[in-house]
Image (cartoon, coloured by chain):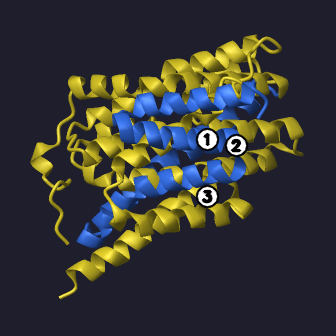
Chain colours: A yellow, B blue
Amino acid sequence: MTNPSSPGDPAAVTFTWTGIWRGIKHQQPFTPGIFAYGLAFGLVAVQAKLSLMQAAAMSALVYSGSAQVATTGILAAGTSGLAALLWAVFGTVMVMNARYILYSAALRPWLGQISPLKAYTTLFFLGDGGWLLAMRAYEAGEKDAGYVLGTGIATCPAWIGGTVAGAFAVGFAPDPKRLGFDFMLAAFSAAMMTGMFRGRSDLPVMAFAALVALAVSMVAGFGGAVVAAGIAGGVVAWLRAGRAVAP
Amino acid sequence: MMSSSDFLALLAVMAIAAYTCRVLGFMAMRYVPMTARMQAALKATPISVMSGIVALTAYNGGPPEWVALGVVIGLMRIFGNDIIAAFGGIAAVALMRATGF
């Protein structure tokens, strides 16, 4: 397989403030949606009898909307005994966030070129929108790994601020659905997918990923479906790449 | 209301689980040889994830989501700018929901 545009040249990978700033700027369109999601989590958390500080601490340290909402559901339902609760929560967070395992694997060729401290700090902030942006930028020739950190930290204020606002505003908050904010991730996915589309040879990867996502969503919810889509597309690409280099 | 020591234990477990997912793939790939095939597979994951998200949205949605996805793809092909395209789609969803679809 020829691999012209890509990755590969380790010497070129940098990690600069300029890159971080570029990532922060490019991530901005996602922030209204993140804020709305934060609002929703804040509302749910207060209803599950968490305090404002507890909800905010969760958003700051877990930094993962779907996992936090699911966990709060477990808390609200109530479980017998702390140990059982902790195991249930651990399992839930791992399942909801399994897609991040895939995301961080895909970042290896890039973040593997910077110091472990920088790489592992960057990975703390990993999220759906930022990862998609960063991967697209990488394919378009971005070498500055600061970009990944920028996209990750850019959503901090919106996420934590949204959580706090939601915890305060029980009863006042507008329905994010009415504003179409729940469509944010889908909208950017569709836009970036169209932008990354390189022609007919991408179709088998995309079609198989879409089919597998639909099938898996029947049993495993959104997080599971996204992981499955990523793996399915990767397998197709893996098989095709093999065919192309076969002697 | 849970006691604050129980909450701290809960918070620690959640934070550890979330961070583990974020670094696990990155750590594992250190031991996987970066062959041309592996590179192709990793390179294909973003567009696969996007296709999956779009398919799930279309499947779980109704006319507002279908029209909006069409708007996004159309605007993207015309302007080549994902911010214009995405917000066009969000506006389409909000508009259609407001008009009762």
Which residue, given by chain and number where applicable, does mark 2 sit on?
B63
Question: Mark 1 to mark 2: distance in Å?
Answer: 6 Å
Res. A152 visible in picture:
no
Describe the element under mark 3 as helix, strand or loop.
helix
Question: Mark 3 to mark 1: distance in Å?
Answer: 23 Å
Q: Nearer the viewer, residue A126 or A171?
A: A171
Q: Residue at x 58, y 66 (%)?
A: A211
Which residue, given by chain and number where applicable, does mark 3 sit on?
A225
Q: Residue furthest left?
A: A11
Q: Nearer the viewer, residue A151 or A83?
A: A151
What x and y, as percent, mark residue B15?
58, 38
Q: Quadrant of residue A172?
A: top right
Describe the element under mark 2 as helix, strand or loop.
helix
What x and y, as percent, mark residue A148?
34, 36
Which residue, given by chain and number where applicable, does mark 1 sit on?
B67
Describe the element under mark 1 as helix, strand or loop.
helix
Q: Cβ–Cβ below 8 Å for labels 1 and 2?
A: yes
* Side (left or right) of A221 relative to B77: right
Q: Residue at x 65, y 41 (%)?
A: B65
Res. A178 visible in picture:
yes
Q: Amino acid at mark 2?
A: Pro
